[in-house]
Image: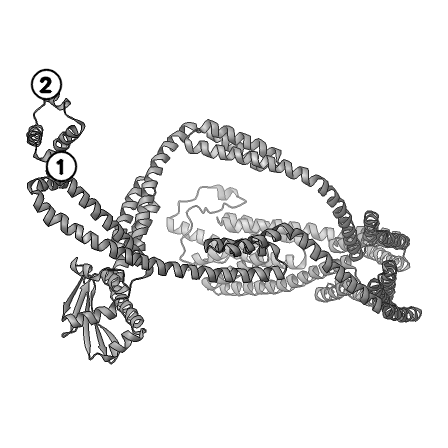
């Protein structure tokens, strides 16, 4: 230990609170007053006194350390007490505390040494007694006297506790406990083996009865017996066999429960199904009423309907569904004001949605016609309506769709010209497939036509040597030019304009160029009209002619009107002008005059009074009144009548011709369809599908009626009726015949094979008996199984069941023999291994105990690990864990011992270096060594000593 009282430098100032100690003894001479000394003399005297005390303390520290190292703790305590007084006199409080702590530590050491001396006197006697008990305990363990060994282990633990060897005491307490457990385990194992033998005999009998129950198809008894066998196997610790028997029991019980359940279900199913259907129908009806009431705003009625639905759900056993309906009814009653408000708001939203739905239909129509700009406007309007309805997400969706439509419109304009070119190419290709058109085009010289689409662009078609070339853009020179919108051009080319000349006059399509070139291009660019289009044209022509006839009759009526030349017409004109001027009719004579008119005159009066002259009818009437009758007849009536007289026969001729062609095509098509139907009906009849054949004959009869073929219609109807009435009988008869054929065929085959199968079965049974005598039970089981299959093929089910049972019995006996042989081999091998490991375990434990007694912790840990390994191999898991724990404990001790020794050595060296540096006056180096000693003390767990070294280092760092 270092000297806590190193000398300070000569020039160090004395501390203010330090006082010169008074002498212990005073003589009378000393008590006489002395002359007053100067401050310098006083300081020198104090400095001298301090040096003397420090020198004295240094010598005393050396003496104290010598006494402590020699074990003379009383003298060391006296010296450290004197050192504490000296440090207190010098005013060094930290050193006073260090010396006081050192004094306490030495007193504790003195007490421990005294106790150790007393214990040392009894140690030899207790060691001899303990060694004797150990030998007797080991002898008792070897002889199986576990109770005596347990008592001796407890006495050894008690003696070890007295000797202060707590680890040894714990070890023998553990051994006593392990011995107790081992004794109980051996007793339990003996009882268990005895019980297992008895249970094996009982289980064998139970399994035999279970197999007999299965053969009798008594599955419930078999299940109970297998369950008993499983319970016995569990008691015998044979979990795998217990699981097998339990599965077999469950299988038998499932078969029994399935049979019983089927019988019960068949009885209850019809009644339960009827009740369930009735309840479900009533619930569905209540829910429908509730939904309708909610839609109409009748919330009380809806709540009542939901309560009814909940009651029906409870009757159906659907408790959760009933709870949902009850909660819904309660919510409706509690929230009826809010629901009414929401219902009104929803009605408003429904109106908005309805309006939006109509707009969306328009948008879809626009999209179908690819009118994207119109569709975009509609979508924007839908977005506004969605905002009014509070559906912001839908509003965003419609806004995005509007943007998409605008994008598509742009893409459409870019792609439409290519589509027009492709359509023209298709039309030209179709037309060139016609031989007449192809030969005519081949005879042309180079011919160029420009097709201009007003809202898109232009393309150029060049015909040369019978081939057509289409290029984008407008050629500088061309023979003709055709222009129009893309829609009108497509209609013109596809033949949808039945009167192409009228389309030109109306400005839908325009052509420029020489007439010959125009005719050539129109001939190849225009497809002939379709049949349905021609039919439309004829229908429209009929309507036009009817309108013309009505117009001519109207003209005749107007021209021959007798009131036109009377003065009444002038009076009516004047009266009409008066009414239009805003005057009122207050002349009673005028009203009386009106009442005296006839019905025709009153009608003409009202006609002229309330018809606006600016209307088309009024203007026409005025024009007719201005013209004279000859002019009307010559200019309007006669040309119209002549044109109508020409058009009606022409239209009639064309119509009759068109209808004749159409009728012939329709009849021919129906005949082809009827022929195909009759073919399918005959195939269905031959293959036995009578229902389908009857349906097809009926269809053929209906087509024959449409074709006015009454004979065939009657024939097909008779066939259908005959098949419809005899379908079930024919099916049954066919099925019976088919089954009889199969049974007869099988009977013949069995008669021919029976003798062969019986001979083969006899041979197999002989082989099975021979294999069973030789002990080849698996071969016997296989032969019995083959004999069972052959018996089934012959039709002898009883013999098949007997042979199957024999096969199972042979297989079971083979499994038992294999298992017994395997268990016997395992037992012999295990006994040899246990004997070998037991000897090695004892040897390892002896070496470990010796090493532990000699405090060779590494060797003790090593051999305890070996003992744990042998115990684990022997199957003694608990002893293995105990040995492993002891090995780990000794390994920790070895590690701590090695670490502690190295740390104490390092601390001792640091203290020596610190004292040497302090003696040389190198206080900073000494302080560093003391700090290192403080850290090492903290690692050793000696916190107080570490604090002392830390305080000494701090004191030394203050010195210069």
Q: Residue furthest right?
A: 773
* Total numbered labels: 2
Contact between labelled residues 1 and 2, with CB atoms less than 8 Å apart: no
Circle 2 residue: 588
Sequence order check: which comes first, mark 2 or mark 1? 1
Q: Which mark is residue 8?
A: none
Q: Secondary structure at mark 2?
A: helix
Q: Residue at x 93, y 69 (%)?
A: 773
Q: Residue 529, percent across and down?
A: 29, 62
Q: Residue at x 20, y 80 (%)?
A: 445
Q: Residue 321, percent across and down?
A: 56, 37
Question: Is residue 955 something one can see in this rendering?
Answer: yes
Q: Nearer the viewer, residue 626 or 78?
A: 626
Graded by Cα atoms within 10 Å as few (under 14), some (14 to 19) or many (20 or more), the crowding at tag 1 reads few
Circle 1 residue: 561
Quarter of image, res 752: bottom right
Q: Nearer the viewer, residue 96 or 39?
A: 96
678 sits to left or right of 158: left
Q: Nearer the viewer, residue 525 or 404?
A: 525
Q: Nearer the viewer, residue 664 or 483?
A: 664
137 sits to left or right of 879: right
| Quarter of the rendering occupied by the C terminus | bottom left
Q: Residue 474, percent across and down?
A: 17, 71
Graded by Cα atoms within 10 Å as few (under 14), some (14 to 19) or many (20 or more), the crowding at tag 2 reads few
309 sits to left or right of 517: right
Q: CA distance from mark 2 to mark 1?
A: 29 Å
Judged by depth in the image, the label closer to the viewer, 2 or 1, is 1
Q: Secondary structure at mark 1?
A: loop
| Quarter of the rendering occupied by the N terminus | bottom right
331 sits to left or right of 863: left
Q: Residue 32, percent across and down?
A: 47, 41
Question: Is residue 508 something one can see in this rendering?
Answer: no
């Amino acid at each position: 230990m270092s000297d806590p009282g190193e000398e300070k430098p000569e020039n160090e100032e004395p501390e203010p609170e330090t006082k010169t100690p008074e002498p212990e003894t005073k003589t009378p001479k000393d008590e006489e007053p002395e002359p007053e000394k100067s401050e310098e003399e006083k300081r020198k005297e104090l400095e001298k006194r301090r040096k003397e005390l420090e020198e004295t303390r240094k010598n005393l520290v050396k003496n104290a350390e010598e006494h402590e190292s020699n074990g003379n703790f009383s003298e060391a305590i006296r010296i450290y007490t004197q050192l504490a007084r000296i440090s207190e006199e010098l005013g060094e409080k930290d050193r006073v505390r260090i010396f006081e702590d050192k004094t306490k530590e030495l007193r504790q050491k003195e007490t421990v040494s005294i106790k150790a001396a007393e214990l040392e006197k009894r140690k030899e006697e207790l060691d001899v007694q303990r060694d004797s008990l150990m030998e007797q305990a080991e002898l008792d363990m070897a002889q199986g006297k576990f109770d005596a060994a347990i008592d001796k282990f407890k006495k050894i633990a008690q003696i070890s506790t007295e000797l202060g060897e707590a680890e040894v005491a714990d070890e023998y307490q553990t051994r006593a406990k392990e011995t107790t457990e081992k004794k109980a385990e051996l007793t339990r194992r003996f009882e268990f083996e005895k019980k297992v033998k008895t249970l094996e005999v009982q289980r064998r009998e139970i399994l035999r009865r279970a197999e007999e129950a299965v053969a009798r198809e008594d599955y419930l008894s078999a299940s109970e017996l297998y369950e008993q066998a499983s319970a016995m196997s569990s008691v015998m610790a044979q979990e795998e066999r217990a699981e097998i028997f339990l599965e077999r029991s469950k299988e038998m019980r499932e078969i029994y429960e399935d049979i019983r359940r089927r019988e019960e279900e068949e009885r209850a199913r019809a009644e339960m199904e009827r009740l369930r259907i009735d309840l479900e129908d009533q619930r569905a009806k209540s829910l429908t009423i509730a939904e309708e009431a909610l839609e109409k705003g009748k919330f009380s009625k809806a709540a009542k309907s939901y309560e009814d639905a909940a009651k029906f759900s409870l009757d159906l056993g659907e408790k959760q569904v009933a709870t949902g309906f009850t909660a819904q009814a309660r919510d409706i009653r509690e929230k009826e004001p809010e629901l009414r408000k929401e219902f009104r708001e929803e009605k408003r939203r429904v109106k908005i949605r309805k309006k939006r739905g109509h707009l969306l239909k328009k948008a879809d129509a626009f999209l179908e016609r690819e009118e994207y700009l119109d569709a975009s406007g509609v979508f924007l309007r839908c977005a506004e309506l969605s905002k009014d309805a509070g559906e912001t997400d839908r509003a965003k969706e419609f806004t995005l769709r509007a943007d998409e439509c605008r994008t598509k419109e742009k893409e459409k304009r870019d792609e439409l010209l290519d589509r027009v070119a492709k359509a023209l190419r298709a039309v030209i290709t179709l037309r060139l497939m016609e031989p007449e058109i192809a030969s005519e085009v081949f005879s042309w010289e180079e011919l160029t036509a420009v097709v201009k689409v007003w809202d898109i662009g232009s393309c150029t078609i060049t015909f040369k040597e019978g081939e057509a070339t289409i290029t984008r853009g407008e050629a500088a020179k061309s023979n003709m030019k055709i222009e129009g919108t893309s829609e009108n051009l497509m209609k013109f080319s596809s033949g949808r304009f039945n009167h192409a000349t009228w389309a030109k006059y109306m400005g839908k399509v325009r052509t420029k160029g020489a007439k010959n070139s125009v005719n050539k291009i129109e001939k190849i660019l225009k497809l002939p009209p379709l049949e349905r289009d021609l039919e439309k044209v004829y229908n429209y022509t009929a309507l036009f002619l009817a309108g013309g006839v009505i117009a001519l009759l109207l003209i005749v009526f107007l021209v021959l009107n007798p009131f036109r030349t009377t003065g009444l017409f002038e009076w009516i004109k004047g009266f009409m002008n008066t009414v239009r001027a805003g005057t009122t009719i207050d002349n009673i004579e005028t009203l009386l005059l009106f009442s005296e008119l006839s019905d025709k005159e009153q009608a003409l009066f009202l006609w002229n009074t309330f018809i606006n002259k600016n209307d088309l009818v009024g203007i026409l009437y005025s024009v007719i009144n201005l013209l004279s009758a000859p002019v009307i007849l010559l200019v309007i009536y006669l040309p119209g009548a002549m044109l109508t007289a020409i058009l009606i026969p022409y239209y009639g001729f064309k119509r009759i011709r068109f209808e004749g062609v159409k009728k012939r095509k329709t009849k021919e098509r129906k005949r082809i369809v009827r022929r195909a139907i009759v073919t399918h009906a005959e195939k269905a009849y031959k293959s036995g599908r009578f229902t389908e054949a009857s349906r097809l004959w009926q269809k053929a009869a209906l087509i024959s009626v449409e074709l006015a073929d009454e004979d065939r219609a009657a024939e097909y109807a008779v066939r259908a009726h005959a098949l419809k009435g005899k379908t079930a009988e024919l099916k049954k008869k066919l099925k019976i015949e088919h089954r009889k054929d199969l049974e007869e065929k099988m009977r013949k085959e069995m008669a021919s094979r029976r003798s062969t199968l019986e001979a083969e079965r006899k041979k197999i049974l002989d082989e099975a008996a021979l294999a069973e005598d030789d002990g080849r039970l698996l071969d016997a089981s296989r032969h019995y199984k083959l004999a069972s299959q052959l018996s089934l093929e012959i039709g002898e089910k009883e013999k098949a069941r007997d042979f199957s049972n024999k096969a199972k019995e042979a297989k079971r006996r083979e499994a038992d023999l294999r298992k017994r042989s395997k268990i016997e081999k395992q037992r012999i091998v295990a006994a040899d291994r246990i004997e070998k490991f037991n000897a090695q375990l004892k040897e390892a434990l002896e070496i470990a105990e010796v090493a532990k007694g000699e405090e060779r912790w590494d060797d003790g840990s090593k051999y305890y690990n070996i003992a744990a390994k042998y115990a684990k191999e022997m199957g003694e898991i608990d002893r293995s864990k105990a040995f492993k724990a002891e090995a780990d404990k000794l390994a920790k001790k070895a590690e701590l011992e090695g670490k502690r020794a190295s740390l104490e050595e390092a601390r001792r060296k640091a203290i020596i270096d610190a004292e040497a540096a302090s003696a040389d006056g190198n206080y900073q180096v000494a302080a560093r060594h003391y700090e290192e000693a403080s850290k090492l003390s903290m690692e050793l767990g000696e916190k107080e000593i570490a604090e002392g070294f830390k305080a000494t280092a701090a004191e030394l760092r203050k010195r210069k």
